[in-house]
Image (cartoon, rainbow, N blue to C red):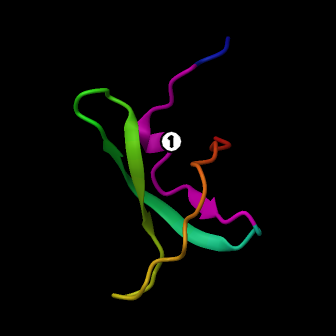
Amino acid sequence: MHHTMVPSDRVEHVTVYGRDGTKLGTIERLMLDKVSGMVAYAVIKTGRALRQPPPLSGSVGRAQI
């Protein structure tokens, strides 16, 4: 059976990689648009303290869950 939805607990703490394969961090939380119900963005825990976050350019990719 093909499911089109994923529960948030299957996405939180998943490792996020850049296009070059470099580990960027882990998904800490998903931010939802209250009107559309769509994910607006993901908060990524990088382990960096009060520094510039890693650059995120281009469109959002798809997760392999």
Q: Name the residue under label 1.
A: 10
Answer whether residue 27 is magenta in the image.
no
Q: Quadrant of the C terminus?
A: top right
Q: Bounds of the magenta span?
A: 4-19
- 10 sits to left or right of 39: right
Out of 15 and 52, give the one closest to the viewer: 52
Task: Establish if 15 lies above or below 4.
Answer: below
Please give left or right for residue 14 compared with residue 33 in the image.
Answer: right
Query: Could you say which quadrant of the image residue 52 lies in?
Result: bottom left
Task: Find residue 7 and report its horizontal and vertical position in percent.
Answer: 44, 33
The image shows residue 32 at horizontal and vertical percentages of 31, 40
- What residue appears at the point 46 percent right and 81 percent down from the top-left corner? 47
Q: How crowded is mark 1: few (under 14 residues within 10 Å), some or many (20 or more)?
A: few
Residue sitting at the far right: 20
Looking at the image, is 38 positioned above or below residue 40?
Answer: above
- Picture residue at 50% right of the left edge, 30% below the top: 6
> Is residue 16 highlighted in magenta?
yes
Q: Residue drawn 72% across and 63% down? A: 19
The amino acid type found where label 1 is placed reads Arg
